[in-house]
Image: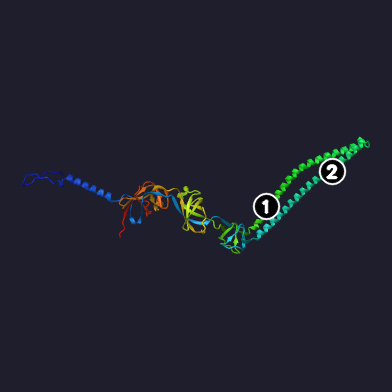
Amino acid sequence: MPDTPLKTARTDRILSLPWWRRRPFQIGAAAAVVGILTLSAFIVLPPPNTVTVAADSLDTGEVTRAAFQDYVALRAAVEPLDITYITAETNGRVISVAASDGIMVTSGQPLAMLGNPDLTLQVSSREADISARLSDTNNQLMNLQTQQQTSEQAVADVAYALHRAEEELSKRQMLREHGVYNDAAVQTYIDEVAYQTQRLAALKSQQAQQAQFYTRQRQQILASANDLRQSREEVRKGLNALNLTAPMQGRLTDFNLKPGQAVKMGDPLGEVDSEGTYKLKAEVDEFYLSRLSVGLKATANVHGKDTAVHISKVFPQVNNGRITVELEFDQMPADLKRGETVDVRLSLGATEMALLAPSGAWLNDTGGASIFVLTGSGDKASRRTITVGRRNPEYVEILSGLKPGEHVVTGGASNLLKAQHLRLTKSAK
């Protein structure tokens, strides 16, 4: 109702309402109260996607600008530098064992003997067949040689006949000059010399053609004989497969054959490891794949002493986010043992100044795409998008999104991946 002056019975004075009872003031006061309550609620109530967590359940660290050492720490296993596997080359049953697991062996040293009657009979039959075919090639060579000798003898006989005819002609011509023979008597010997001359020329021409044929035949026969001998050696190797020998010098391992044991072709029977020469094998996070290369330098801590090593092989296969690498020693340590583990520090680049954040579970949780940043009071944290660069086991290079002196949550937030804000509470003591 509108504000109107009031009249009383005793007086005709007009009385006004107090200012605080006037309607405009009351409306303004109510609006102010609503505004204050709204602002208080905005300040007090947390923003959406806020999760309350205990402060002591989180790991935190400070963002700093410092020297970044570009390396990755590895745990490597010691393995023999050279490993040669022993596999069964044929089926058989173990007749005897001449070596035991763990001993040092030399190349060709007998390890075990297998038995296979069917293989033995088969090899003997094939060897006999090949020997018979080799005998045939020998006969072919002998026949070829006989033909050559016959051809050469025919040429020699005709040459001798020509020589005799020339001698007789010479005698008759001398007697004709003394009037003993006439021309008709000498003509017969002239014809004989001409005949033997033509015959000798024909035989020599035929011999030259036959010589090329004999040469080709001899080459083919010798090649066939050589193939047969190689086949016989391969057949004999079938029997040699029954005799297991050491493929190289070294230490025999995983060799557990027992007499009477049946083995099949291709079965692994053991291995021979190089003794005194070793390599390291380690797994590296696939994040570093593009930066790994053969020859990359590293340092291995062997029994408390630093030893220089380098990457000798990078396997391209990725298994469960890990890549396998092999490293070789620049100078072989003298006290290594197969199977022991060694800490390796793999250098990926030079030391440089950079903005760094502590490494932690947050890297795996977000892939380095975001991180919770604490407020100055430390009772709240908000997720912030960032860009990371190089990494080492202690720090991550920050390319954008953070500033020196800021504090971040490095661990304990793995189950808060959907949260955008954290409200930190102190545990009651």
Give the residue displayed 78% in from the left and 42% down from the top: 207
**Amino acid marked by disc 1:** Gln
Left or right: 229 with respect to 58? Answer: right
| Whole-percent x, y for residue 44 in the image | 27, 51
Q: Which mark is residue 400?
A: none
Residue placed furthest toward the right: 180
Q: Name the N-terminal-most of marks 2 and 1.
A: 2
Give the residue displayed 44% in from the left and 51% down from the top: 71
Residue mark closest to the camera, 2 vs 1: 2
Secondary structure under tag 1 reads helix
- Judging by the rendered image, the residue that carries numbered circle 1 is 230
| Whole-percent x, y for residue 314 in the image | 50, 50
How many labels, in total?
2
- Judging by the rendered image, the residue that carries numbered circle 2 is 160
Along the line of sight, the residue nearer the viewer: 173 or 365: 173
Q: Label 1 crowding class (10 Å Cα cut-off): few <14, some 14-19, many 20+?
A: few
Note whether 400 is above or below 339 in the view shown.
Answer: above
| Whole-percent x, y for residue 328 in the image | 51, 53
Left or right: 184 with respect to 301? Answer: right
Q: Is residue 288 visible?
A: yes
Secondary structure under tag 2 reads helix
